[in-house]
Every structure is written in C-alpha cells, then in structure tokens.
Amino acid sequence: MITKKVLNPNRIRRIDGGFSFIPHCFLTDGFLSSLIQKEILLYFFLILASDRYGLSFYSYDVICSYLEFSMDDYVEARDGLIEKDLIAFDGTLFQVLDLPETPVQSPPTKAVLESTGRGHRPEIQAVIQQSLWGTQGD
C-alpha cells in the first residue's frame, strides 16, 4: 500500500472565495472521457468563473478571448455541455450543474470524425472519381 504524505505543507489547496471544485467522480465515472477537448476547456473555465451556486455571466466574446476559441468552437462546446447535462444556459447566465448520475454520451462531432480519419468523404470521392476517369479514358 502506498503511504501518502503532503509534499508541501505550506501549499495545501483550499477553496476560498469562488467555488472552483471538481468532484473526483468527474474523472473516475467517465465524465471527463465523454467530453471533447473544447468542452473540457469551457467546462473548466465555467467552474473557475462560477460562484458557489455554479453561476457565472461571462460573455461569449470574453470566453472566446480567454480560451482562444472561434465563435464556432464556443457554440460547439457550449451546446455539447448542455446536451451532456453538465451546464444550463439562459442566453446570458451559465450554471454549472451538479453531475448527472452517469455521463451522457453523444454522437461524435464533425471535428472528432475528421481528427480520427472518419469523415474524410472528399478523399474517398476523389479516389472514386480518379478510378472512373481512368477507366473512361481507356
């Protein structure tokens, strides 16, 4: 058994002021692995920016500036977190919600499909067209 000891007793983490807390089950129950990178960044930002009720009111342009997101990145991440029941948003105010019982899995996004090699239809289309043109010229 591993014995744990505090490495730096002068720097023990405590929560003062804002809430900024992520439960351990976020990692162990699969919530983290259910998110794409942009959703993770936005979720962590909203946790850091929220009060003890999980509320924050940063505008999309401030969020995009901090996270270096395009508007499309922001909308995709925000909508993904809403679909996964991790946040609520009323158009102005965000609320980081208590975690649902289990992670909500959503279908892969266009960005995920393209990064994994699935979704490269233009390449497949080009191969088919090349093979058809090649046979037509014979």
Image: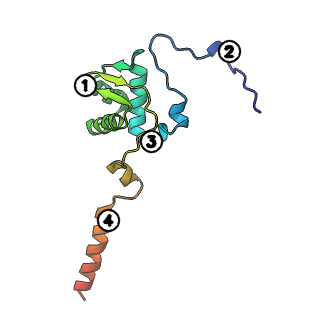
Q: Circle 4 sits on which residue?
A: 123
Q: Residue at x 52, y 26 (%)?
A: 23
10 Å crowding of disc 1: few (<14), some (14-19), many (20+): few
Mark nearer the viewer, 1 or 4: 1
Q: Nearer the viewer, residue 17 or 120?
A: 17
Q: Which mark is residue 9?
A: 2
Look at the picture and state if 90 lies above or below 70: above
Which residue is disc 3 drawn over?
A: 34
Which label's residue is closer to the chain start, 3 or 4? 3
Q: Are marks 1 and 3 in contact (CB under 8 Å)?
A: no
**CA–CA distance between discs 2 and 3?**
34 Å
| Element under disc 1 | loop
Which quadrant would the N terminus be assigned to in this image? top right
Q: Quadrant of the C terminus?
A: bottom left
Residue 90 has which mark? Answer: 1
* Percent x, y of residue 64: 31, 30
Kind of residue at disc 4: Glu
Instruction: For the residues labelled 2 and 3, say whether their Cβ atoms are less than 8 Å apart.
Output: no
Q: Which mark is residue 8?
A: none
Label pair 3/4, CB-CB below 8 angstroms: no
Asked which secondary structure carries label 4, the reply is helix
Does residue 75 lie above or below 59 as drawn? below
> Disc 3 to disc 4, how far (Cα)?
28 Å
